[in-house]
Image (cartoon, rainbow, N blue to C red):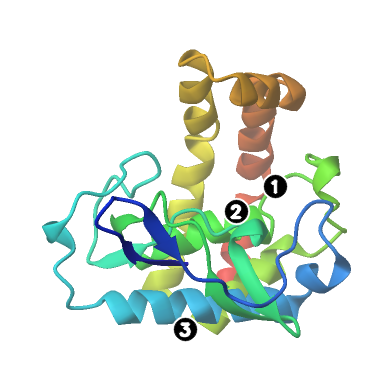
Amino acid sequence: MPVGIDPDRRERLGFIPGDVATPPYPAWAQTDEALGSIARLIRRLHDASVGLDLGATTWSDEMADPSGGEVMCHNDVCLENVVFRNGEAIALLDFDFAAPGRREFDLAAFARMCVPVDEPGATPGLGWVTVDRPARVRLVSDEYGLGATGRSTLLDCLSESIARGGEFVRRRVEAGEAAFIEMWESMGGQERFDRRRRWWDTHRNDFAAALT
């Protein structure tokens, strides 16, 4: 984790002991218990940022909430950016894309990647097992502590996130970044994200029912 900047402009980092899940994700990282613990950790991050002057610094706009907001959002809470101990999330890593936003926007980005909110079998290299996706989104909402209004906003944020699917990777591809070009091609290009949008349109009501 970042600690500070030395006079010579080198960044000083601290080490957080624990476990980080990498693809293919191990079974312990895919449990409901692990998912719920991340939701609670995100809640603590948001609550800790309340009252801070978030306008006093410059933030990345690459994954930021276009509507803005009053809490600091991580915006990239995937399993690789979480430190666990004994299956419990205890720290978040990689705040490159952090920016002010709505709680539900950050929670939707996390749910999309870690529930995952995606068509089954879409990302075989990640090793996701078959799960009840709507039920896991409900779990995220419960563990975070969202009320009825927040759950409705979460559903809308998921729709927004999926509608914009692929924009971040495509921008990097258009900039000529080799790693993202390879990723884009391996995923099947824009069709992969169009397919996810079609899947969401078909199943959105299932998620809405789970959040009621």
Badge 3 crowding class, 10 Å Cα cut-off, few under 14, some 14 to 19, many 20 or more, is some
Q: Tag 3 or tag 2, which sits nearer the N-term?
A: 2
Residue 88 location, x and y as percent? 67, 83
Which of the numbered marks, if any, corresponds to residue 19?
Answer: none
Residue found 81% across the figure and 58% down from its top: 25
Are the two marked residues, 3 and 1, in contact with CB atoms closer than 8 angstroms? no
On the question of residue 153 being in view, the answer is no
**How busy is the neighbourhood of tag 2: few (under 14 within 10 Å), some, or many (20 plus)?**
some
User: Viewed as shown, does residue 140 lie left or right of 146?
Assistant: right
**Circle 3 sits in a helix, a strand or a loop, which is it?**
loop
Q: Earlier in the sequence, mark 3 or mark 1?
A: 1
Query: Which residue is nearer to you in this view: 176 or 166?
Result: 176
Q: Residue furthest front?
A: 8
Residue depicted at x 47% and y 83% = 145
The answer to whether residue 128 is above or below residue 200 is: below
User: Which residue type does callout 2 highlight?
Assistant: Arg
Tell me what residue is drawn at x 54 percent, y 35 percent.
165
Task: Give me the C-alpha separation between circle 2 and circle 3.
Answer: 18 Å
Residue 127 in the image: x percent, y percent?
86, 52
Q: Determine whether the residue tagged by mark 2 lies in a helix, strand or loop.
A: helix
Q: Which residue is mark 1?
A: 118
- 164 w.r.t. 154: above or below: above
Q: Which residue is mark 3?
A: 145
Determine which of the numbered discs, if any, sits on residue 112 in the image.
2
90 or 3: nearer the viewer = 3
Q: Height in image: 36 above or below 171?
A: below
Judge the density around disc 1: few (<14), some (14-19), many (≥20) Cα neighbours within 10 Å.
many
Q: Are marks 2 and 1 in contact (CB under 8 Å)?
A: yes
